[in-house]
Image: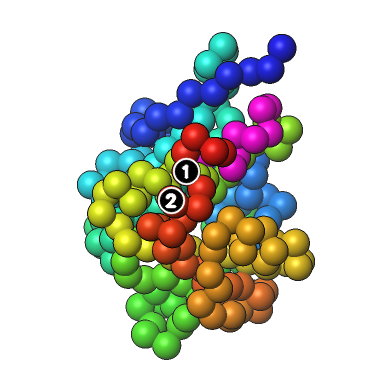
């Protein structure tokens, strides 16, 4: 029997579940380092994200048993969202200390990213405007079409919130990723590399065109 899905806005009380999904989905993703900061850190991270007035986070659950299957996060204003995290950087740093002790290289990764966010010349991170942050679907999570439906719903919601476009950063470890982005309506604005010299593209979704091409009832 195929599972049925429910989609809803995530709340701060969902933070631990989103952190768990992020760890499961992110450990094998190219260029991903946040999962290695641990569940406690990511739970705090998502509590801050979900408490911000600028965040837009949609999650998917199994209707029958409540299993968390995936989520799509982002913000209507990347700069304002970054300011919210900046206010909590001491708390997040304190929580991350254990991870730094066990894996000292993680501290270097955090420092490099912090500097990049404040460096006007860095072009691999979206620093302002509407931004898609993380799209996760549990490996093997059923029904499999839920991932595409989640992506579609999140972008439609951003459009209803008067966002004309959304930009996202995507690491492209093989050609299939690039093709998938284009198939989903994304336009590649630029090609760059992340701090670990991995290829990355900056993608923009024209939300009016996206919503016309992918109406909710067609996904």
Residue drawn at 33 percent across, 41 percent down = 50
- Picture mark count: 2
**Residue 126 as seen in the image, left or right of residue 218:** left
Q: Which percent across, then down, holds residue 145?
A: 64, 35
For this rendering, which residue is in front, 201 or 14? 201
Q: Which percent across, then down, holds residue 36?
A: 61, 51
| Magenta stretch in the rendered image | 142-150
Residue drawn at 49 percent across, 34 percent down = 217
Q: Tell me which corner region of the image, top left, top right, bottom left or bottom right, holds residue 186.
A: bottom right
| Residue matched to label 1 | 215
Q: CA distance from mark 2 to mark 1?
A: 5 Å
**Discs 2, 1 touching: Cβ within 8 Å:** yes
Q: Tell me if residue 208 comes above or below residue 161 in the rendering.
A: below
Q: Tell me if residue 24 comes above or below residue 67 in the rendering.
A: below
**Can you say which quadrant of the picture contains the N terminus?**
top right
SS category of the residue bearing label 2: helix
What label does residue 211 carry, if any? 2
Can residue 25 be seen here? The reply is: yes
Residue drawn at 25 percent across, 54 percent down = 162
Can residue 46 be seen here? The reply is: no
**Residue 169 as seen in the image, left or right of residue 84:** right
Point out the residue furthest to the bottom here. 121
- How did the renderer colour the structure? rainbow
Magenta stretch contains residue 145: yes
Badge 2 crowding class, 10 Å Cα cut-off, few under 14, some 14 to 19, many 20 or more, is some
């Amino acid at each position: 029997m195929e599972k049925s899905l429910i989609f809803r806005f995530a709340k701060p009380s969902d933070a631990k579940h989103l952190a768990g999904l992020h760890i499961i989905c992110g450990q094998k993703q190219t260029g991903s380092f946040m999962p290695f900061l641990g569940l406690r850190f990511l739970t705090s991270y998502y509590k801050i994200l979900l408490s911000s007035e600028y965040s837009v986070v949609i999650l998917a659950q199994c209707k029958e048993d409540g299993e968390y299957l995936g989520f799509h996060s982002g913000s209507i204003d990347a700069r304002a969202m970054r300011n919210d995290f900046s206010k909590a950087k001491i708390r997040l740093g304190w929580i991350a200390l254990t991870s730094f002790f066990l894996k000292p290289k993680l501290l270097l990764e955090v420092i490099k990213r912090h500097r990049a966010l404040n460096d006007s010349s860095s072009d691999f991170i979206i620093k302002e405007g509407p931004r898609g942050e993380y799209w996760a679907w549990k490996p093997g999570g059923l029904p499999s079409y839920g991932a595409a439906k989640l992506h579609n719903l999140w972008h439609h919601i951003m459009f209803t919130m008067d966002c004309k476009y959304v930009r996202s950063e995507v690491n492209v470890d093989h050609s299939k990723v690039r093709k998938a982005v284009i198939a989903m309506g994304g336009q590649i604005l630029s090609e760059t590399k992340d701090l670990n010299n991995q290829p990355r593209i900056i993608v923009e979704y024209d939300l009016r065109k996206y919503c016309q091409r992918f109406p909710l009832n067609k996904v």
